[in-house]
Image (tube, helix red, strand yellow):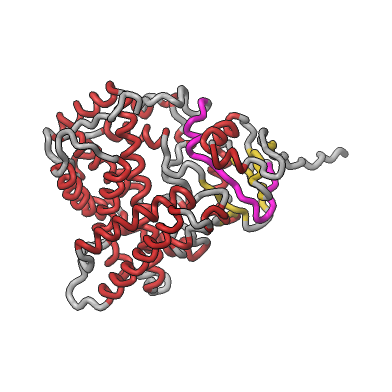
Amino acid sequence: MSVPAPTRPLIPRQAPGGLPLLGHAVAMQRRRLDLLEEVQRLDAGLVALRLGPQRMLMATDHQLVRELLVQRADDFGPSPQYRLMEQVTGQGLLLSEGAFHRRQRRLIRPAFRHARVRHYAELMTDLTRTWTEGLRDGQVLSLDEEFGNLASSIVVRSLFTQGITEQDAASVVEAMTDVMAWVGARGSDPLPFLAKLPTRVNRRFAHGSRTLHTLVDTVIAHRRGLDAEAPDDVLTWLLATTDAETGERMSDGQVHDEVMTLLTAGTETTSRTLAWCLYLLARHPEAEERLHAEVDAVLAGRAAGFDDLPHLPYTRRVLTETLRLYPSGYLLSRASVRDTTLGAYAVPSATTILFSPYSLHRDPRLFPQPDHFRPDRWLPDHTTEVTPDAYLPFGLGQHGCLGEGFAWTEMTIALATLAARWRLRPLSAQT
């Protein structure tokens, strides 16, 4: 009787081009996006990279990424790089794990249901209308700054409709600018030692972070002592919601961490996506014309509201395609908490697994003509032009973004309202 030989686990392919001692650290720092696409093109499932003394694996197969985030989610936790974010979010949804994380998702999820997002949309419309009404013909705008301020204002006012002065709100928006600059530079950086250097970004982050932590604690304390009826905002929900299984509420410290998580997550995706969207529209006038035609027909110059969203399908496709080309989380990571497997690969405990929505979204096997900005690839009958399972702008599984519906609503309202009143032009034809 013959017995099948045991199947040996696959060995990750070594990424080419590493330097002695430094490995791929220099390339990761100086030309990161090019390196990610080069690794993606190897078509090797898992690829090994070395960043100085650290050995990491990068998943280039979207099915392995789904396995990492969904089927084997309990075998992986925050990577050492993500642990840097504890300085911002503490043990909020971004970093909490296991049963505690699942409990927190249960408690927070209802705050972002359809009816609640409709309520927040009124704030989005009002704030975006005020912003667009303040613009002037010929004005030069820094889109990163403009959309960063708008997104910060929206999330701050959704979280705190009372208990925060206009001056406090302005200080939060200013502090968020410095915190998000650090998040973009350091928060998912595979070289975590850079967060310890006395750079300008790190120093400004420290000041902005202190400002935010202090103000959030002050608002929570004020809200706890409020005798009048609590305002209808996210903070009220976080303070009042009760675990149906235990009857417990969140502690003030946990509410603080979840507020900081929402502030961070609610700013970065929308502001960056909107800025990239205007950049892409400036380079593709035919898409810009179609966007304006749709917005003019639906809005006729007024601000967009929640009920307009189903009537703005091209606007939604423009944003969808923008997130494909420029996902805000371009490089993400998890770390194995025990010896496990991923596909046919053995993954030892404490191994960091990288994956890049940016390089997955630009893989021609998954998205034909990946460098082309083509919003209509997302039409329902264009199924051969996209691989939905490989589209990951908001993550997947138990760590997928709870505020995805909030973000889509905000981005669509902001883009449509801006397009209803203004056409933006780059300063240079080479922009």
Q: Is residue 207 visible?
A: yes
Q: Position of residue 377 (x, y in %)?
A: 38, 26
Q: Name the one closer to the observer, 301 or 312.
A: 301
Identify the residue shown where x is 20% and y is 28%: 292
Identify the residue shown where x is 34% and y is 28%: 431
Asked whether residue 363 is drawn in magenta, I would say: yes
Q: Position of residue 273 (x, y in %)?
A: 35, 40
Instruction: Classify the position of the N terminus by image quarter.
Output: top right
Q: Position of residue 117 (x, y in %)?
A: 26, 52
Q: Name the one closer to the observer, 326 or 309.
A: 326
Q: Would residue 258 be found to the left or right of residue 32 on screen?
A: left
Farthest right residue?
1
Q: Would residue 260 be found to the left or right of residue 363 on screen?
A: left
Asked whether residue 30 is drawn in magenta, I would say: no
380 vs 304: above or below: above
Q: Is residue 409 visible?
A: no
6 vs 289: above or below: below
Q: Name the one closer to the observer, 247 or 155.
A: 155
Q: Position of residue 428 (x, y in %)?
A: 30, 27
Identify the residue shown where x is 44% and y is 48%: 184
Circle count? 0
167 vs 306: above or below: below
Residue range corresponding to the magenta coloring = 345-364
Q: Name the one closer to the observer, 388 or 153.
A: 153
